[in-house]
Amino acid sequence: MKTQLLLLLLLIGLLATVPGIAQQPALRLASPMVEAESGRVVNELIVQLRPGERLADLLPYINNRQPASVVSPRTVAASLNMHLLRFDPSQWPGESLKAWLQRQKAVEGVQYNYQVEFRHRPNDPEYNFQWGAERIGMPEVWQATPGGITALGDTIVVAILDSGFDLEHEDLAGNIWANPAEIPGDGVDNDNNGYIDDAHGWDYNSDSPEIAYGDHGLAVAGVLGAKGNNNRGIAGINWNIKMMLFTITYVDEIISAYEYVIEQRQRYNESNGQEGSFVVATNASFGLATPMFCEDQPLWGNMYDLMGEQGVLTGAGTANRDRNADEVGDMPTTCESDFLLTVLNGTEEEERQSASAYGAVSIDMAAPGENSHSLRLSNGYGTFSGNSAAAPHMTGAIAMLYSLPCELLAEEALANPKETALWIRSVLLQGTDPQPGFEGITATGGRLNVRNAMAAIADQCGGTNGPLELLTLFPNPASELLTINYETPDNEPYEFRIYNALGQLVYRNQDLPNRFGTKSLEVNVSDWPQGLYSVMIFRGEEEAVRKLVVAH
């Protein structure tokens, strides 16, 4: 036995001298090394390779320069060719590896990995009621819909990325997403998405379907989607909703979760609802301890546009620190994506909570946050504050608007998901309540109001598509303002021209038809000579003409 052990030790020693089989610097490659103050993982980079390039070709090339210095613990997003690299800082000091990778033709982009900071403040037991729901007009919205499904019956899903949840909480019963294409516990990837038994989402901390237990994500889920009207606990912004859950700690895991969301919504879009899930929003009650701009996290930041292409918006809260995000940066709220809605922590007094960040460009509006009321562990309830509470008010509002009884909205969400998401964002921005306390520190100068956004959708829900036609010219004769009401077979841009009786062009304009309401265009004719005119709408070979009289 001793002889066999001696031979084994001798063999290990010989292998350690062979190039390429030398012992790994285990301590430096075994786990993330996180800077305490910044949250940066000093020995991890997220790299995106160009289409057609392979990590299997890049890794040997790196390790030929510095032997056994880099490994890849996991693929971050396979469809985007993104990978996590863990390296030995003693062999790649400073930012030398990042700089070297940026010079390689095979590399599309590269950034450091960061540990996520969850944006909550200490609980304050003085407040034990949901003042925020009243302030943003939810009682009126609940009269129209409790949430959960669209006017056509599509089940609405929201993804929450956080540190941990309590799936057994009594006030979440029925509101946790269940993957319709997965058989829990059978050890098989039934829907062929790369995740085995992903019944409710994924825990990236343990790389398993077992969602971690924790209070922060639970409180976020409570604000967004605690079961309503069930004689217990609280009512979420959505009484009925399906919440897809992810536990994350690092930026690479955020990207992976977003890739999961993209695939689910893309499958739903392309299969007309037969596969995937109707994910309309993700919640971001997290950020980075170190202030930085979106350009410093390009791979992460680009994910919001990629989700938006599929029709997914994101509600994000800014940092729980008294600083101007426009000047010093903040992730993800400084990302300029059209599919991101950002909020700061508002108080009952309609003021910014003093420890909340702000920004007249980066932060869209305020939302109720401080002293909100939500779920606690072990079927408990209590105060939940900070930007972590403000964000799910916004994300919940997005989901609630999709559930309004407007069939046209539900149809457009399937036929034109990207455009519909942008429209939902616009009505939320336009529907804010102006408040002096938020002027100059948010882009809108106001606070979230879901009731106002609902009213805007109701006003525009009667839109139709039909044969190209000029329906009415009002008034006719016209003396000042002419309103042209028209119909189109789609919602693409159309051109309008008006000619006088001599055939001279006096007016030309291109209009994008309203997707949800009356299609109309206003023209000022107050300084036009009296007489007969021809009004024309056309695109390509399609056209329609009506006569107009101008009389003063």
Image: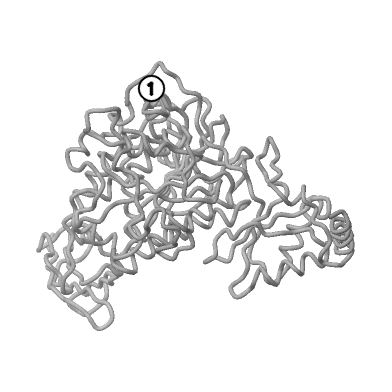
Question: Residue 140, relative to residue 282: is it above or below?
Answer: above
Q: Residue at x 31, y 48 (%)?
A: 427
Question: Residue 13, relative to residue 236: is it above or below?
Answer: below
Q: Quadrant of the C terminus?
A: bottom left
Look at label 1 and name its amino acid: Glu
Residue placed most toward the observer, 99 or 1: 1
Regarding residue 87, the answer to whether it shows in the image is yes
182 horizontally vs 37: left or right? left
Residue placed most toward the observer, 182 or 482: 182
> Residue 463 at what x, y percent from top left?
18, 60
The crowd level at tag 1 (other Cα within 10 Å; few <14, some 14-19, many 20+) is: few
286 horizontally vs 17: left or right? left
Question: In this view, which residue lies farthest toward the bottom?
Answer: 541
537 horizontally vs 58: left or right? left
Q: Residue at x 16, y 74 (%)?
A: 467
Q: Residue at x 87, y 54 (%)?
A: 2
Provide the residue designation for mark 1.
Answer: 349
